[in-house]
Image (cartoon, grey):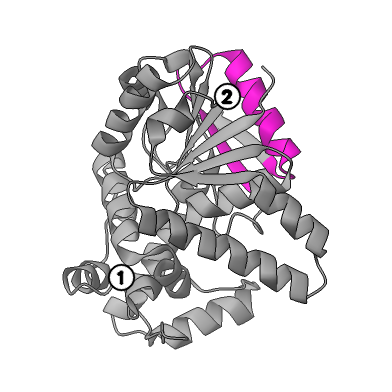
């Protein structure tokens, strides 16, 4: 299938990041969200990245203008869905919400339109069944920030067709990314490996072995990581981290995935990390 227009549903960090990458790769992009303010915030993020690239000499003004010419925004999902060849879902990590969205899109989109979910761990097979077009639904798990991270995990549902897999790989490569396919399994590849690592960092904090900054610094210096486990959790969002970790724990029933107490306590206190200004660290969001 020749993919020309991509519909991105959700203009948050992941959604507007993917919209930017797709537009920069020559795709026509429709970015939608439920409120105009959300869409505008997403465009602010795109413009911020483009202006930064322009100032650093990474892009020319002509290239910036070209990217923006490929993006249109809307709160009318039905109208944009009718033209989409490929849908990328980037809403919050909730099975019911994603299932309902795909069920709606199934009625709005062309019969051959492919649906890709950015879920980091939910069952692609179950989302496919909920969508009404399981052969055309696939996982497309990006990493934050989308313009910079090369990996795309592509979990394949039990009924996902080979053609859908081929097309998604082709789209990923056209965007300059490195796709990896895997079976539809809890946590896929990366989260299955990283969640116990995150948890051990938080367990050390709970046990009083070291302070947050010491834990992260030790990992960065000793392991060569750019960010430590607690910094990364703050970046992703502790509310999202708790949801993901709890789901993995319930599905795999292994204590290495059990959410640490400090994570539960911070989320209960409304401290979700960078987006709220406080998590394991404090942030000045006014800058």
Is residue 7 toward the left or the right of residue 286 in the image? right
| Mark 2 vs 1, N-terminal side | 2
Is residue 150 toward the left or the right of residue 7 in the image? right
Q: Which quarter shows the N terminus?
A: top right
Give the foreground label among 2 and 1.
Answer: 2
Q: Nearer the viewer, residue 266 or 197?
A: 266
**Residue 134 appears in which quarter of the rendering?**
top left
Q: Which residue is mark 2?
A: 85
Q: Nearer the viewer, residue 178 or 101?
A: 101
Q: CA distance from mark 2 to mark 1?
A: 35 Å
Image height of 86 relative to 135, above or below? below
- Categorize mark 2 by other alpha carbons within 10 Å: few (<14), some (14-19), many (20+): many
Give the residue drawn at x 83%, y 72%: 57
Is residue 267 toward the left or the right of residue 6 in the image? left
- Categorize mark 1 by other alpha carbons within 10 Å: few (<14), some (14-19), many (20+): many
Give the residue drawn at x 32%, y 35%: 98
Give the residue drawn at x 68%, y 37%: 27
* Magenta span includes 182: no
Query: Is residue 244 something one can see in this rendering?
Result: yes
Which secondary structure lies at badge 1?
Answer: loop
Give the residue drawn at x 35%, y 21%: 131
Q: Nearer the viewer, residue 49 or 137?
A: 49
Query: Is residue 159 something one can see in this rendering?
Result: no
Q: Which residue is mark 1?
A: 272
Query: Is the C-beta separation of discs 2 and 1 under 8 Å?
Result: no
The location of residue 54, given as percent across then percent down, is: 76, 70
**Residue 262 appears in which quarter of the rendering?**
bottom left
- Span highlighted in magenta in the image: 151-178
Is residue 263 toward the left or the right of residue 3 in the image? left
């Amino acid at each position: 299938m020749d993919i020309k227009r991509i519909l991105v549903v959700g203009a948050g960090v992941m959604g507007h990041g993917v919209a930017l990458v797709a537009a920069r790769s020559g795709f026509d992009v429709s970015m939608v969200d439920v409120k105009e303010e959300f869409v505008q915030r997403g465009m602010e993020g795109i413009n911020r990245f483009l202006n930064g690239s322009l100032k650093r000499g990474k892009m020319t003004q002509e290239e910036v203008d070209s990217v923006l010419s490929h993006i249109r925004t809307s709160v009318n999902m039905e109208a944009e869905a009718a033209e989409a060849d490929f849908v990328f879902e980037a809403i919050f990590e909730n099975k019911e919400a994603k299932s309902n969205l795909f069920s709606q899109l199934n009625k709005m989109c062309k019969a051959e339109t492919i649906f890709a979910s950015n879920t980091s761990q939910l069952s692609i097979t179950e989302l496919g069944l909920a969508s009404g077009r399981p052969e055309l639904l696939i996982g497309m798990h990006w990493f934050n920030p989308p313009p910079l991270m090369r990996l795309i995990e592509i979990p394949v549902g039990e009924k996902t067709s080979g053609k859908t897999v081929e097309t998604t790989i082709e789209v990923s490569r056209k965007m300059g990314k490195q796709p990896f396919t895997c079976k539809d399994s809890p946590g896929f590849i990366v989260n299955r490996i990283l969640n116990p690592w995150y948890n051990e960092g938080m367990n050390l904090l709970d046990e009083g072995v070291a302070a947050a900054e010491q834990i992260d610094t030790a990992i960065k210096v000793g392991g060569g990581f750019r960010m430590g486990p607690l910094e990364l959790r703050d970046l992703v969002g502790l509310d999202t981290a708790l949801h993901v970790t709890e789901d993995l724990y319930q599905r795999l029933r292994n204590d290495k995935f059990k959410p640490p107490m400090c994570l539960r306590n911070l989320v209960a206190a409304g401290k979700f990390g960078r987006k709220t200004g406080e998590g394991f660290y404090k942030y000045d969001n006014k800058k």
